[in-house]
Image (cartoon, rainbow, N blue to C red):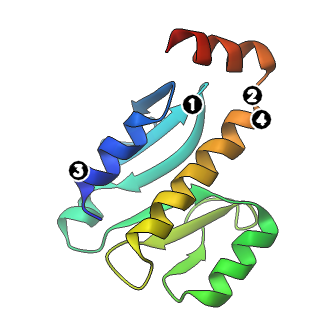
Amino acid sequence: MNLQDYYEFCLSKKGTTEHFPFDEDTLVFKVGGKMFALSSLSDWEKGMPSVNLKCDPEKAIALRAEFDDITPGFHMSKVHWNTIKTNKSVPDKMIIALINDSYDLIFKSLSKKIQNEILDAI
């Protein structure tokens, strides 16, 4: 997965917005004002791309056991977030599925009012 594919896929999710709340390097994707994906742009430029994605805690542990390139979330809650090194051992299809899972976890945590506003805006 390259940066453009990652960027376009995240933005294709309903109600997604992009932000740089921490610095000019960390691209954050949010839905309903809550983060579901973030990544360092300079790491992509250096050839060390990775993304942080929210994950169900039990699934997060299983994924870390299965893939060396999935680790506890860097600078995030180690229980709820994973860092996935892209262009390594994790297939692009799985990265897409993990982005979907992260988005869905956040979307489902939003109030019904906000969920409906996002769905109605599309």
Tell me which residue sits at (71%, 45%) in the image.
105
Verify CB contact (< 8 Å) between mark 2 and mark 3: no
Asked if residue 54 is positioned above or below residue 89 in the image, the reply reads above
Nearer to me, 58 or 77: 58
Q: CA distance from mark 1 to mark 2?
A: 9 Å
The answer to whether residue 82 is left or right of residue 88 is right
Q: CA distance from mark 1 to mark 3?
A: 19 Å
Residue 24 position within the rendered picture, expressed as x and y whole percent measured from the top left: 30, 41
Secondary-structure class at tag 2: loop
Image coordinates for residue 112, horizontal then vertical, percent:
79, 19
Query: For the point 81% across and 71% down, which residue is it?
Result: 58
Q: Amino acid at mark 1?
A: Val
Give left or right: position of 109 versus 29.
Answer: right
Taking depth in this image into account, of 50 and 107 the one nearest to the observer is 107
Question: Would you call the spot at circle 3 few (<14 residues within 10 Å), some (14-19), or many (20 or more)?
Answer: few
Q: Which residue is mark 3?
A: 4
Between the residue at mark 4 and the residue at mark 2, the CA separation in whole angstroms equals: 4 Å
Q: Amino acid at mark 3?
A: Gln
Tell me the tag on residue 31. 1
Residue designated by label 2: 110
Q: Position of residue 102 (x, y in %)?
A: 61, 51
